[in-house]
Image (cartoon, rainbow, N blue to C red):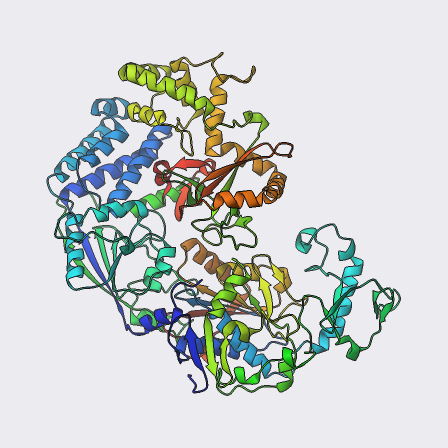
Amino acid sequence: MTTQFQLFLEADEEWQAIPSWVAFLIRLGYGWPSRVSGRRRIAVVSMPCDSAGVGLIALGALVRDLGNPTANDLDQHYDRILKNGRQYLDSCRNCEVRCRPEEKDCGYTSEATGRLRHRGRTVYTIAAADLRSRRFLVVRPDLDWWPNPSRALEWQIDGEPPTRAYNDQGTLAQAAYVGLVEGATFFSDNLRRSFSGLCLASKVAGASATLDACAAIRFRSRYGDQRLSDLLTAWSPRNSVSRIALFNSRTEELNRSSAPALIVADGDGAFLKIVGRTRFQHSDVIGVIHRALERDRLEDVGNKMASLRQWYTDDHELLRLLPALPRGITVSILQRVN
Amino acid sequence: LISVAASRVFNFLQSHESFAVERYELASTAFGSLRRSVRQIVQRFRESEDQEALNISERLRALLSELLTVPVPLDRAIRDNVMDVLGQGGDVEGRWGSDIRRLYAAALRATEDLQAEENPMRQLLREIIRGLRSRERMFKVYCHRRARSHFETLLIDSADQPLPADVFLHSVKDYRETEPFNVLLKVGPLRARGWGSAPDALTNAPRFDTLVQVLWSGCSDEPDFGYDPTDPGLSRTDSRDDRANSAGMNGNRETVKWRVRVTRSGEDMGPRSGPEVDELQLFREMDRLQDKRFATLLQIDDLSGILYPPRSRLLSLDPDPSASVPIDHRIPGEALLEGIFLIRPLLYDASLGPVQAEHGRYSQVWKARLAQAWQSGSFGLIESLRAAGLNLLHLDAAIRHWCRPPSTVIHAPQQARHFQILLTVLGIGEGESGQSSRTTPWWQLAWNEVRRSRGEAISAAFEVHGIVEEKLLAILNQQLPAIRRQASEGRDFRVIMPAGSELSGEVAFHKVRDIEEGFAAPQNELRVVRELTLIDQWRV
């Protein structure tokens, strides 16, 4: 599984070939089935110690998506902006609660701020909409925005990454990902496009806890040294392409407006939060936990998996496709019965 | 931050085809007799509806559980402890009957016999530690924080180096932050909760190649110890290759395999009517029949702690200056860790009278009177209290305890009825200094003060008025810079609600010393400050 193109460094250790546990986790994410339709899967990856395992699985899935021509936000971009604008005008603009949609039971899953950023720079607030067709928004009293999809790409929902990079500075470097997975292919256009179909859910202690763990892992390739946290693009600068959404399990905020297809959750607390949220009821979930925990917390995860078995069954087929599990890692994968 | 590089752990696991358990089982006639006698008293009192009997049952149970899981010296203190719980022999027969008297006598005889020799468990542990040192094996001891001194006193010979602090592991967090080593020393059976508990990771994610386990015969590891949520059925130390391979779910896993070697020493020649009984398992079963709730302990000073239902979201302060949300609701063991301050509101509650600025205002009066009465005639005081209905056995120890000055809590009787009797006998009543209400009796005001110190008042208020907590949060956030300054000193502190705010009273900030799971306590014992010695009885 190791490759001559990539070396691995963890914290203060020595550079080494990618170890088997790292290769396994990357491969697990890479081999996770892309799900356009089909039955939902929920998995728990149980580790013998705390680690940046969640980032490694997410990295594998990110490499997988880089090779998928449909793994981008272009197709839905225009509708997402319209939908976001309508929600703001119809509800959030006049809402007295900031912002707990599930408590208010307003039907939305998160707040729409009504703020749009133009070419990564100036922010405008949506002022009105065409009430008849609802096919355009007014982002300033003097600036109409017409339903022109090509022009829509100049706009992004404030707080979200650009759907397509405005310039070369915000794009990804393919060379940084080559060699992480043998045989991986890349669709070069994706290096310039963001994607919201993959999500990393941070530890319940907060996004910075997961960021710190991922920043302690580095890969060396011909492209140079890269931190895992940078490769993941979940914490990318504002106008850069981001291929992973970030769910902060402490604040329970997702930094995208659409629900992802796959969520990789860091820790038992994040896993339980994600699995229990209606917003993510159609998303695949991989929870990465470690076993150096109190029994109550381990049982919470075990009990959740046991309760899911009412509607899910063990996915032996996907388990068989995985490489041999390194000693100390155990995996359970469930798939919805129908 | 992750304290041990995952690669180190994986390399360690990969370099061991299997791991070893060296299990030493000890037996002794005298110890067996003590176990059987105390166990039978516990069982019989447990079936009683008498609160006094139930209290004795709980205390004896704690005493026996400690003997089974901690290498305590089997000296005169054991006899004193048993007597401390049950009192003098004559009283016992008169109060509880001849059966209990007979069991009690057998227990006391056993404690006398045990004093003839050193606890064999301590002898064996000393030999094991010396052996490990001579072979230069890197070892650790997993034990409860308060059991530590019993390990440290094993090596009193001048030829022995004392055990350094970093040898001890007391929590799952300690274990998580430990680099791989050679040998783990553990006294008692492998249990996930309660007396002698240890992390499941000991067997499903070992960071040592050999587990040396020393325990009394008849004590069994919990069948599901080593629990792994991906496969709860495949986690035992006695797992064999065939069992691992039969697990269809993870057929391609490389299971952690254990080889167990058992060495038995000593013999229990005492009379027995059936097979050996595992008291720890028995007590756990007894708990299941009681109306108790599982709980997590937050230790807030050397003597006190608070039990909370598992996964409670507790208002707390993170003293780290870089914390973006310092005051927040956190779950113990998850985001609420040792070093974080637990926030305990002591707010005005109309039904309890106003909070006093000075902690223990009423207690100063009655404690002084109690100490005076005790010094002038302890026997007479005990007789008077018994005659008035405060009929606790071994009342003398209780009175000495109540005389102690207030700490986090005000030491006092557990029941209001007993407290009222105490103050009546002491002659404290109307017109006493500190009287602040014409309608509420003095003893009631003093009792409210005791309750408030335990947190009983505010917990009730919060349940009814959840909105109060939101207001409190807003007020605390306004005072955040001052609160952070106080927290930076690393000691417990209190913040008085500012004048003119919607809330009256004060808020205590307790630095969390330790977090421990494995308790089952009555509902009314949750969320209140209790002394650790009392809380011990609710270990499962």
| Residue B28 location (% of width, % of height) | 15, 46
Could you tell me which quadrant the C terminus of chain B lies in? Answer: top left
Image position of B3 with respect to B499: above or below: below
Q: Quadrant of residue A151?
A: bottom right
Q: Quadrant of residue B137?
A: bottom left
Q: Total marks drawn?
A: 0
Q: Nearer the viewer, residue B264 or B11?
A: B11
Could you tell me which quadrant the N terminus of chain B lies in? Answer: bottom left
Residue A32 can be seen, yes or no: no
Q: Residue furthest left?
A: B116
| Residue B121 location (% of width, % of height) | 18, 49
Image position of B269 with respect to A320: above or below: above
Q: Residue at x 46, y 81 (%)?
A: A220
Residue B159 can be seen, yes or no: yes
| Residue B322 location (% of width, % of height) | 52, 55
Q: Nearer the viewer, residue A12 or A256?
A: A12
* Left-right relation of A227 to B190: right
Image position of B532 with respect to A115: above or below: above
Image position of B516 with respect to B350: above or below: below
Q: Residue furthest right?
A: A132
| Residue B283 location (% of width, % of height) | 33, 43
Q: Residue at x 65, y 82 (%)?
A: A168
